[in-house]
Amino acid sequence: MNQHATRFGSLKHYEKGGVEVINDDARNYVFSNVFEVASRAKPFEKVAVGKNIEYVIEAIRIEGTSGWRAPAQDEFALVMDGEVEIRLLKLERPGVVPAGAKGSIALIGTPAGRKMGVVRARRGHMTLLPVGAAYQFQATHPGVVLLQTLASEDTVERWSDICQTTPRPTA
Amino acid sequence: MDIIGSIEPNQHGYRTFTLGSFGFSRDEYFAHVTWPKGHHMLPVDAFLRALQRDIAWGFFYGIVNFDQVVGTMNHYGSVDLFAGRFNDHYRRAKLDHTERFQTPLIQRVFEAMLDDWTNAGFDPFASPQETGSAFGPKNGSNKEAITRHRVTARRMIGAPGDEPVRSDDNGFPINRHFLDVPQDTPEVLPEPGFEDEIVSFNLFAYLSRSDVTWNPSIVSVCKASLYCPTTEEYILPVIHGNDRVEWFVQLSDEIQWEVEDRETGAVRARVTMKAGDVAAMPADIRHRGFSPKRSMLLVWENASPELPALYASGKMPPTPVQF
């Protein structure tokens, strides 16, 4: 018998810890939960749950079919819940991403280019979203992706709404 | 070649070492550290676990406190070895002591000490339930365990020419605490000609096969943004003092963090993280984690080399966002 049950979270079931302040401000820890954030987000909203100067980790609710995006550098998508199809396309004109752009940019419609392939990813699967390509997410049922990237104009920062601000976690 | 440490072993079979005016010796149970104004002793298992990580991490980002008294501070090319530097009581009593060494020198001495003091059967990277004892008189060595390859992906695990995924075949069985972690692989369907450009792997399965604890290793690189997940069990063998903001994403199970003031050790907060929780560790704290069951933690680092100076000068606030 396996005595050690591994606990992962999901949109349907997650438990949240928290900050117990002794001599500090809980806001210093920018504490949130990706499943809670995604459960309250619009589909494909790129909500920052971590920020380190220009770098971010975004929690993205995957539901339906996203628009196409093109990364300005490699990005990495980690599925935290659900089953997500990731479609990749080699951009015919990589210059659609302006020089100096950070993170990724939204593209209008389906960009010109060759189909690279598809990844069907489930919980725990990490996929490279390579620079020079465009990508699209699709999920029949709501899922959650954590995206390792840089902040772009589409990154949503609403720290007061998603983070613990009280000295003790609220129930 | 220079001789590092004493030639003759002490009565317990271990060599003694000096580094500047610091002295290091061990007996059957303890590591002893001396400096001009004081001396200190640590349980040798805890000392070796801390020493192992300090070496493997290249002295890491910022401060590696072995305990409340002894540790190192990385200056990225040189390293401070200190006693009492980040202990308010030692500082007030003026009993603290710090010496700076070029990194290759302290690295060589620490590696020689770890090699000589680690007995056969003791693995400093393993959880306490998965290793033998560190105690007793000198009994062989365990070079294989203390010289493990450290995973540092250049782009992403599984990418062509990069670090491989783990499997039974390459010596990474599933850990006893992660037997229930699904081992499925993503369905990768490349078009002809793009077989090497579509890359995906099961990170959770990869972590379930880690044979070490508390050892962040790079799995994906987004410029200076490094994902450094690790599997944690029992207690973080060092108290990590930050020289920049560090982030944690709890991927599975639970870790509790004790957070203290970086300079004095005064307690500031306790942070409990469960699966899906995200928290920042500010640049002016130190932290130690406690993981009752082996858990998966994503440590997220910004490796930009200019950050320590920016935080130290006060040009950057110690917290990553203000709201």
Image (tube, rainbow, N blue to C red):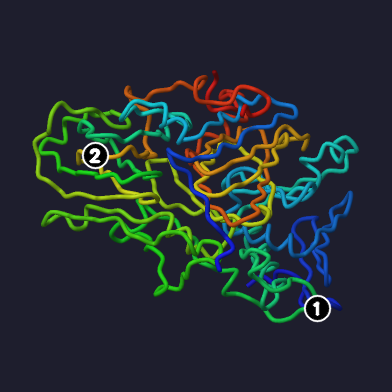
Q: Quadrant of residue B234?
A: bottom right
In the displayed structure image, the side of residue B74 where residue A134 appears, left or right: left
Residue for point 73% across, 52% down: B66
Residue B242's label in the rendered image is: none
In this figure, which residue is indicated by the disc labeled 1? B137
Residue count near mark 1 (Cα–Cα under 10 Å), binned few <14, some 14–19, many ≥20 = some
The residue mark sitting in front, 1 or 2, is: 2
Q: Are marks 1 and 2 on the same chain?
A: no
Q: Quadrant of residue B165?
A: bottom left
Q: Can you say whether A1 is above or below B283 in the image?
A: below
Q: Can you say whether B90 is above or below A6 in the image?
A: above
The foreground one among A18 and A9 is A9
The foreground one among B210 and B228 is B210
Under mark 1, the amino acid is Pro
Where does the N terminus of chain B fall, quadrant-wise?
Answer: bottom right
Q: Position of residue B86 (x, y in %)?
A: 76, 40
In this figure, which residue is indicated by the disc labeled 2? A138
In the displayed structure image, the side of residue B206 where residue B65 appears, left or right: right
Q: Position of residue A113 (x, y in %)?
A: 9, 40
Using the image, name the chain to which the residue with label 2 belongs.
A
Under mark 2, the amino acid is Gln
In the displayed structure image, the side of residue B233 where residue A148 appears, left or right: left
Q: Position of residue A37 (x, y in %)?
A: 45, 30
Q: Quadrant of residue B47?
A: bottom right
Mark 2 element type: strand
Using the image, name the chain to which the residue with label 1 belongs.
B
In the displayed structure image, the side of residue B110 where residue B41 appears, left or right: right
Where does the C terminus of chain B fall, quadrant-wise?
Answer: top right
Q: Can you say whether A127 is above or below B245 in the image?
A: below
Distance of label 1 from label 2 (alpha carbons): 61 Å
